[in-house]
Structure formats: structure tokens, C-alpha cells
Amino acid sequence: MFLFRKLATLSLAYVIGAPRACIAQIPHVVPEGHVGLYFRGGKLLDAVAEPGVHVHLPIITRLVNVQVRVQTDVVRNVPCGTKDGIMSEFERVEVVNTLQKEKAHSIVKAYGADYDIVWIHDKIHHEINKFCSNKTLRQVYVDDFATLDRSLESALQSDLDRYVNGVTVIAVRMTKPVIPETIRRNYEAMEEQRTAALVAMRTHEVVERELETERVRVVSTARKHAEEAEIKSSTEARRARLQAETRSYEDKLTADSKRYAVEEEAAANQALLTEPYLRLQATRVWEHNTKAYFGERIPTLMIDPVQPASPATTASTWWSPRERQQ
């Protein structure tokens, strides 16, 4: 850079002291993120210089470096007069924007190298004045301040797209407006009261949520115990029903078994009561439990059974006709 300045100084001295036909071009630098535009005799030339080292004719040619990367325009001390007659001021409004490289020449030709003064700085003043004139101080300072940056961004971009077509607004940042001290203290006191009321409301909501949570827990616990008791009662009733059914089934099986045994025994006895079997049993009884009497005058044999007291004394007595007559 020092070399370029030295060369420019020497060239200027040479130009001043040299005839017009011997005027030489001097070097200049276009920094990165810029394009170089040339004015000669007040007219914008068609040439557009890319970043780097270039040369131009001194005195008659003026170089303008135009920034084509993201830049921030700062607008200071923007007045704001509200509809209730109170004046305030926005100390700093920042507009982040960028100029399209291919549109730089046409925009500078139409609006000059300071195009941002017209379409950003002056436009910010106009839009804020329009915004404030329809709002009260409270709306500007409290209620609608959060939406002001988006409103400005939208208004700026709308006009730039309509008239300029090559500048893009990326963001708008701003500080709270400066208002009279007495009004500011009143707003601060009101904000403190609002904050205290908000804290009290939030505390009340937290307490209500805790109570609701406790109520839900109690109801849930009671419902759980009721369901457990119902399940237990149902289980016991089912167990009792199953036990009754089991006993009934067992009693039925026992009765069926006894009936079957009696029927089988009766069938067996019925099968045994044949003439030979009865005769055999009579013979056995006669052999063990009877007394026989023999004589000349006994034409027949008669057996009278006597109910025995025991198997040892049970007997049948034989009587002759003579003894029976006596």
C-alpha cells in the first residue's frame, strides 16, 4: 500500500508538470468484497473493476469502491412523535443488508454511490415516523415494540424490490426509544407491578397444579385400592364357587360310586340266587347249625330254624311227630 501511494504521488507530480499528451495512468486498489466503478467528467463509465490492482487516469477519472458483501447501515437519532403528543427518539437502528454484485453498476448509475442514504437511512426515518404517528407512547414503548423490527424489515424490502431490485435486507435491529425521564420511571414502576402480579399469578398456578397433582394421585390411589379390593373379592368368590363345584362333583362321584357298588352287588347277588346255590347254602347251614333226631316212629324229617344269639349257638331242631304232639 505504501508503494502504491508513493507511485500515485510521483505520478501526480509528473502529471502536474507534464504536458497533457504525456499524462500517465496511476495504479489503484479495489479491496476484496468491493467492485470499482469509474466516473469521468461526472459520467459513470461502463467499466467495472474486480478486486485487485488497476490503473486509471488521474484528475479526470474518479474511482468509487462499492461494497457488495454484507454490510450494516447504522441510522442514529431517529425521532418518534406519537399520536398522544409525546416525543421520543430511537438512538440506534441497524439495518443489515447486502448489494448484489451484478446490480451494483445499475444501482449506482440510478441512485449514486450513496444509494443506501436514500433507500435505507431516509426510508428508516419515514417508516418510523409513520409507525409512531398511529401509536400511543405505550404502544410504541411496550405493546408493539417487539413487532417494530419486523415491520421495518418488511417495509424496506418491499420498496427495495419495487424500485431498486438488487438490495436485500437481512435483518433490522434497534434499541428501545428514549422517552422523558418521568414517563420512563412510571413505566418502570408499572412494569415492576406487572411483574409482581405475574409472579403471584404464576405462583398461584404452580400451587393449583400441585394441588391438582395431589388430587389426581389420591384419586388414582383410591381407584387402585378399589380395583385391588374388587379383584380380591372376585377372586375369593371365584375360589369359593370353584370349591363348591369341586365338592359337589366329588359328592356326585361318591354317590355314583356307591350306587354303582350297590347295583353291582345286587346284580351279583341276583346272579348267585340260583336253585343249586340256595340248596348248597341250606346244606351248609344244616351241617353246622342243626340237631338231628332219629327214631322208629319218625316218618319224616322236619327242620325248624331258631334265631341264633351267635354263630356258636345257632341251630335248627329236629322234632319227631310224637314229640310235636306232646
Image: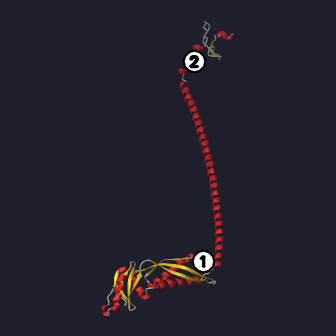
Residue 170: x and y in percent read 47, 77
Q: Residue furthest left?
A: 22
Front: mark 2 or 1: 1
The residue pinned by badge 1 equals 141
Of residues 62 and 159, the one drawn nearer to the viewer in this rendering: 62
Above or below: residue 279 compared with residue 107: above
The amino acid type, in three-letter code, at marker 1 is: Tyr
Above or below: residue 22 compared with residue 124: below
Q: Residue furthest right?
A: 326
Determine whether the residue tagged by mark 1 lies in a helix, strand or loop: helix
Whether residue 206 is visible to the viewer of this picture, yes or no, is yes
Query: 10 Å neighbourhood of mark 1: few (<14), some, or many (≥20)?
Result: some
Of residues 61 and 277, the one drawn nearer to the viewer in this rendering: 61
Q: Is residue 210 left or right of residue 169?
A: right
The amino acid type, in three-letter code, at marker 2 is: Ala
Which numbered disc flags the more N-terminal residue, 2 or 1? 1
Colour approach in the figure: secondary structure
Residue 24: x and y in percent read 32, 88
Above or below: residue 29 compared with residue 23: above
Residues at marks 2 and 1, CA–CA distance in whole angstroms: 135 Å
Residue 180: x and y in percent read 63, 80
Query: 10 Å neighbourhood of mark 2: few (<14), some, or many (≥20)?
Result: few
Residue 309: x and y in percent read 65, 16
The residue pinned by badge 2 equals 282
Of residues 203 and 19, the one drawn nearer to the viewer in this rendering: 19
Above or below: residue 83 compared with residue 298: below
